[in-house]
Image (tube, grey):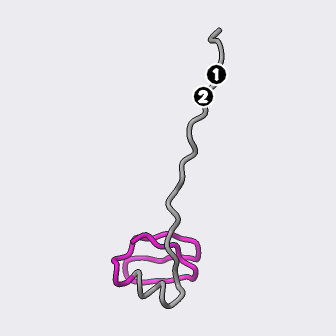
């Protein structure tokens, strides 16, 4: 589960700062969210590609 950290967290496999995103297993993710260390990461919303309308020169 992809989480966004609200506090720094270090471990043997990672060193995360506030604002970093990391993929945790479901149990660890729920524990971190319940403790207030992380929130669900917002999925990136890609803007649609704008195309020019009109005659080609």
Residue at 53% from the left image edge and 70% from the top image edge: 20
Q: Residue furthest bottom?
A: 35
Residue at 53% from the left image edge and 85% from the top image edge: 37
Is 30 in the magenta?
no
- Split into 4 quadrants, where in the image is the N terminus? bottom left
Whether the residues at callouts 1 and 2 have beta carbons within 8 Å, the answer is yes
- Which residue lies under the disc numbered 1? 53
Note whether 22 is above or below 53 in the view shown.
below
Is 5 in the magenta?
yes
Nearer to me, 23 or 46: 46
Mark 1: secondary structure: loop
**Which range is magenta?**
1-28
Residue at 38% from the left image edge and 75% from the top image edge: 24
Coordinates of residue 30 in the picture (x, y in percent): 41, 84
Coordinates of residue 32 in the picture (x, y in percent): 46, 85
Coordinates of residue 18 in the picture (x, y in percent): 58, 77
- Which residue lies under the disc numbered 2? 51
Mark 2: secondary structure: loop
């Amino acid at each position: 589960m992809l989480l966004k950290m609200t506090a720094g967290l270090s471990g043997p496999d990672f060193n995360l700062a506030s604002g970093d995103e990391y993929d945790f297993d479901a149990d660890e993710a729920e524990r971190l969210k319940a403790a207030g260390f992380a929130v669900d990461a917002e999925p990136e919303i890609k803007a649609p590609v704008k195309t020019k309308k009109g005659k080609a020169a």
